[in-house]
Image (cartoon, grey):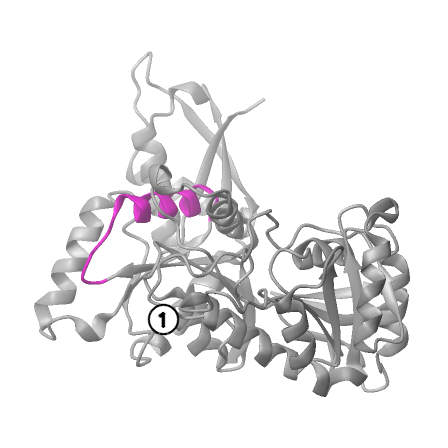
Amino acid sequence: MRTEFKKTGNLPTVVLAGRPNVGKSTLFNRLLHKRRAITDPTPGVTRDPVEAECTIAGKSFRLIDTGGFKLADCEGIDKLVVKKTLETIKKANLIILLLDAGDITSEDEEFISVLRPYREKLVAAVNKTEGGRGQADAWNVLQFGFEKVFMISAEHGDNVGELGQEIIRRLDFSKVNESYVEQISSIRIALMGKPNTGKSTLSNRLTSSNSSIVSEVPGTTRDIVEGNFSWKGRDFTLLDTAGIRRKSKVTENIEYYSVNRAIKAIDEADIVVLMIDAAEGLTDQDKKIAALAHDKGRGIIMALNKWDTMPQNKNTFKDISSRIHFMFGQMEYAPIVPVSAKDGSGVDKLLSTVIKMYDQLNISIGTARLNQALEQWLTEYPPPIGPRTRFKLKYAVQKSANPVHFIIFAHRSHAVSDAYVSYLRNKIRKDLGFSLVPVLVEIKESS
């Protein structure tokens, strides 16, 4: 679909930084005026940097929420989070150092020391000072040489407006360029699947970045990590989501919010790429994710990841595909693509399939052509003529594209059987160019 939109480039970058549980994600959501990052009292909720465009007083900039800086027990995933945070800080135009009201901790002192080379682009803010709480101790921050400290409450909004004004004052917007351009809409892809199936590895490969932390630890990704890339003249937006486990295994509040956020990503996507461990095969969770995407009319591609570890003979793919199609009786339209996120094999085929699928999702069929086709289908397979089963299909319209939704008006609509609706759906898919996508057919009573 071609659309005209405002294209903004070279936006300055503001990074929120601090130790765990000082309220960075809460401040991130407050500045954006929407819930974008997951917030929870548990320290260390944010792992991957979460990025969004933020606008204050008509000025736009990139706002990035980072994982907390830790000293104690900084091993494994925590070490990767700290490394990612420091990489993000280096690229920032402005750093908001967020501290907690109360005593200065050793981690605060160490982090302030780490940030000394960036002093000219540093703004200090002390959070959780609503109603003047803890401000007496908070002024101790001045001992580190800050000329100004903002006393704020990210949760309640106290003095956040003043902090926003300081952000705008300190940023250089002279290099920002804006233009209105017409182009094909960006294709939005949600990477979904069980934990540790390679979603973040594929995300980093496609975006040519290391935005998502990659670890052998299942459940590393919590927030949705959004990235953009282009391929063969088409623009893509990628949503790397948290791995979805069985409900009985979701024990933490954080994971609950992550999973729910991942499921909501289906609403924001055009196409769901379901990452499946090729060796493990399809699981019940994979089937549930695919069913959710199908019900919402999203395109679905099953990506058999880690294909480089599978036996390389001609029957391997055929056998696995047959098992998947057997388990998905009503979803034979969904393409299955073998890939290796690690070495990149199969990725070009995956993207070409995404483009074909997106183009099909956005097909609009004229009413005249649709009803000519309907007449032909009725001739090929006439409706039953029994006194209880007879019905008459009068005309059809396409209600929407992406999701693809048709309405067929009938006399005695209640008599139209599921089998006949399935027949019509298959004919629409085959004859009108929707071979790769889900098609919703709705029967309504004609007046």
Count of numbered tags: 1
**Is 279 within the magenta?**
yes
Q: Quadrant of the N terminus?
A: bottom right
Query: What is the span of residues highlighted in magenta in the rendered image?
Result: 278-297
- Residue 282 vs residue 56, the one in the foreground: 56
Q: Residues within 10 Å of mark 1 (few under 14, many from 20)?
A: some
State which quadrant residue 54 falls in: bottom right
Q: Measured along the vertical axis of the image, is residue 318 above or below residue 43?
A: below
Magenta region, main secondary structure: helix
Return the residue at label 1. 350
Left or right of residue 13: residue 317: left
Q: Measured along the vertical axis of the image, is residue 237 above or below residue 407?
A: below
**Residue at coordinates 86% horizontally, 50% vertically from top-left?**
158
**Residue at coordinates 78% horizontally, 77% vertically from top-left?**
122
- Residue 70 vs residue 26, the one in the foreground: 70
Q: Is residue 6 visible in this depiction of the protein? A: no
- Residue 355 vs residue 290, the one in the foreground: 290
Q: Quadrant of the C terminus?
A: top right
Q: Percent from the top left, x then y, of residue 227? A: 55, 70
State which quadrant residue 375 falls in: top left
